[in-house]
Amino acid sequence: MGRLEGVEDYVPVSAWRRVTDQVHRALAGEFDHVTLLSESWDVRRVQAAGFDGFATYDPAFEPDAWLNAALLATRVGMPFSFSVNPGLDEIGRRGLPPESCLFPRPFVPAAPGLEWSDPVDRERAHALSAQRIVESLEGSLLLQTHPWFATSQQGFFLVFITSFNEWHEGHQFEPMKDADALTAEERREILRGMILTRAVDNRLKQFFVSSEIRYKDVPFQGKGFRSLGQEAIYAAAVRLRRGPSYKGGDGRWQGDVIAPLIRDLGAALAMRPEPATIRMALNAQMAKAGPPLDGKDLNIGDFAWGILPPTAPLGIATLTIAGLAMALSSVTVVANSLKRGRLR
């Protein structure tokens, strides 16, 4: 407690090299080219560890330093990418002893004298964050597309958004609309949905801490991904095509499809705001028989209602849902062409 010490490497370069070599060999027969990216921008270490390039993640890595990183990468022919981000606003942990060294980093972009209780300062922070989004997007695009740098020379292009898993880790950068754009009914539904999400979450917690769930007289704690503090995810689905009106006469789903991750209970409830979804959530996180996965996993999902069950590791569902979108788009194109007599 209270003492900071430098750690040279979390994982030795040799260990990384073994893994990256294995990945390259395993995928060599499946793809004509594979690009493995490291989060570190230490070009020498990235190269020695067997990575092909780097993609920075930390919003505290200022755009002013990106040019130098791009030049270092280009000297060794290494592609790179820099993340679009609104900055950083970490929240300090509560209940820590005074001598603890676990303190939040300063607000990014730098804003000396920022006082959150002052409405003027809050607007200043908002303006700085909005400016960072534009600055980071423009900077990443410029450095990746400029012919002087390795990324453009190799035909590589990647722009991604840094959005933390928890709001207190620095920020959550999610699509949103102005509050004025929401109808009165949408606001009421969002409020009801958030309350429902919290209630289901609290009941799950009670199941786990009270040992109500037992297997052969042995208390079962379950996995229980908490959604505490993230109930507003319910609002993400309010304008999607969802609910009973998108069930076809043959029972097939005709609405939108989402891929909620571990703390997106609210989004799943929004897709089908019915008691069956609540039962599904309770069954899933207690590994009980029944929908969605008959106790084989601890994630929520109901594909018949547009809710794709997630898989581990986190983020895999992003690729799955993208593949589904491409497949559904192709089916639509073929169906429309058949109707017009363009396919034979």
Image: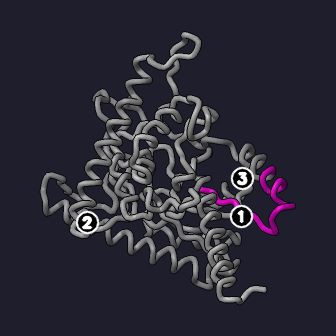
Could you tell which of marks 1 and 2 lies nearer the N-terminus? 1
Q: Which residues are magenta?
A: 22-39
Q: Position of residue 320 (x, y in %)?
A: 63, 58
Which residue, given by chain and number where applicable, does mark 2 sit on? 182
Pick the front one: 229 or 26: 229
Amino acid bearing label 3: Ala
Mark 1 or mark 3: which is in front? 1
Pick the front one: 341 or 292: 341
Here the colouring is one colour
In the shown orientation, is residue 13 left or right of residue 176? right
Q: Position of residue 161 (x, y in %)?
A: 48, 64
What residue is rendered at 34% in x and 59% in y? 108
Amino acid bearing label 1: Thr
Q: Is residue 41 visible?
A: no
In the shown orientation, is residue 227 left or right of residue 42? left
Amino acid bearing label 2: Leu
Q: Is residue 271 visible?
A: yes
Mark 1 or mark 2: which is in front? 2
Badge 2 marks a residue whose secondary structure is loop
Which residue, given by chain and number where applicable, does mark 3 sit on? 49
Which residue, given by chain and number where applicable, does mark 1 sit on? 35
Could you tell which of marks 2 and 3 lies nearer the N-terminus? 3
Mark 1, residues whose alpha carbon is within 10 Å: few (<14), some, or many (≥20)? few
Residue 217 bears which disc, if any? none
